[in-house]
Image (cartoon, rainbow, N blue to C red):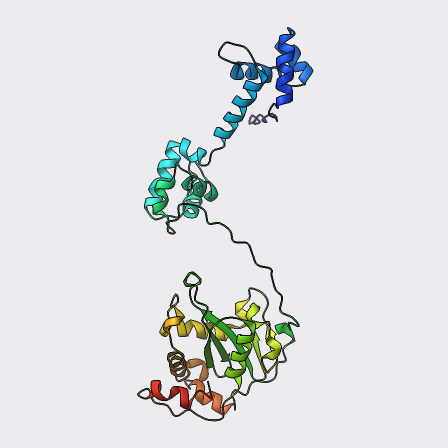
Amino acid sequence: MKNKRKKRKHFSHLEQQKRDRIEALRNEGHSQKEIAAILKVDPSTISREITKRKRKNGYYDSDTAQIKARVKRMNASYKGRKIEGGKELKKYIVAELKEKRSPDEISGRMRMEKKPFYASKNAIYAWLYSIWGQKYCRYLCSKRYRSRKQKRKSKREMIPNRIPLEQRPKQGEHAEGDLFVSPICSGIKKSGAIVCVPSAQLLSGTFIKNRRPVVMAFAVRKITAALSIRDITFDNGIENKEHEQFGLPAYFADPHSPWQKPHVENNIGLLRRWFIKKGTNLKLVSENQLQAYLHILNGKYRKSLGYKNAYEVALERGIIQKMPEITLNNLSETLSEKIAFHL
């Protein structure tokens, strides 16, 4: 039969009041056993307290003992103590960091391989951001030498009179809308508003100077003015707060559910892959360029449309009334004049 592991005794640190009593009882001539009985602690607690906290002359002073205890507790809990004190653990972590492994990878790998040592992801970050591990922060992907300060979240706003996607009628031509934006770190507010009609994979869009609800409402009215569609589906971004001003019924996907509007998501991905790479500063892309890119995508022969292009199918279904007469040679010059009505 396996020996049961002995449970560790629960304990609490001595406070100033009990140290004062220890000093007073010792001065009255009480033994360590008697003091332990009076304070209702284990005799070994009194023995360790007197041995470790007494002065150099052998006298136990409660104030001195309290200061020594406080200093010891402060030094015992410094960040990165576990890693800095474990030679094998530290050597393993440093080697993995040099191999461009993230703390999450290192921690997970140690657990998977059942190493005799272990440190969690948070413990590794705490060590790296301490004075002991800062010299190894250069191996991190972020090259950050301190933890990022959490920004105070702004007050959450709700979309008024929001109608969930489940209530959208099945009949009619539906559309999906979304935004693509510049990198957050660039600070650029310019965004691209895109509308896709799934039945024809027809794309329309324009740039907006910022994501204010009023600006977004104007852009949606402009984009959909020449499209014969019944309604449009968006996500829950606060830019859609003025959806009642879109000029047509608006429905909303569930939070964090981009798959409920897959066509616009996929086509924005296509726009990203072909023309406007992810991470592009949209300030460098003109409105004419965007319209040219959308025109090229609308002219692609799609397998899902029986190898027809979006314009042909949209014309057949009555989504647009006229086929744009544009050639790639004069596209940049005439796009804004000839097909702005349809896009």
Is residue 301 at all visible to an observer of this figure?
no
Query: Residue 124 location in percent, x, y?
Result: 43, 41
Q: Is residue 182 above or below residue 221?
A: above
Residue nearest the observer in this picture, 291 or 83: 291
Q: How many marks?
A: 0
Residue drawn at (65%, 70%) of the image: 160
Residue occupying the far left of the picture = 329
| Relative horizontal placement of residue 259, taking residue 141 as reference (left or right) | right
Residue drawn at (36%, 74%) of the image: 274
Query: Residue 75 location in percent, x, y?
Result: 48, 29
Query: Residue 76 location in percent, x, y?
Result: 49, 29
Q: Image quarter for residue 159?
A: bottom right
Residue nearest the observer in this picture, 241 or 267: 241
Is residue 329 at all visible to an observer of this figure?
yes
Of the 4 image quadrants, the one containing the N terminus is top right
| Relative horizontal placement of residue 13, taking residue 117 as reference (left or right) | right
Q: Image quarter for residue 24?
A: top right
Query: Residue 71 location in percent, x, y?
Result: 50, 26
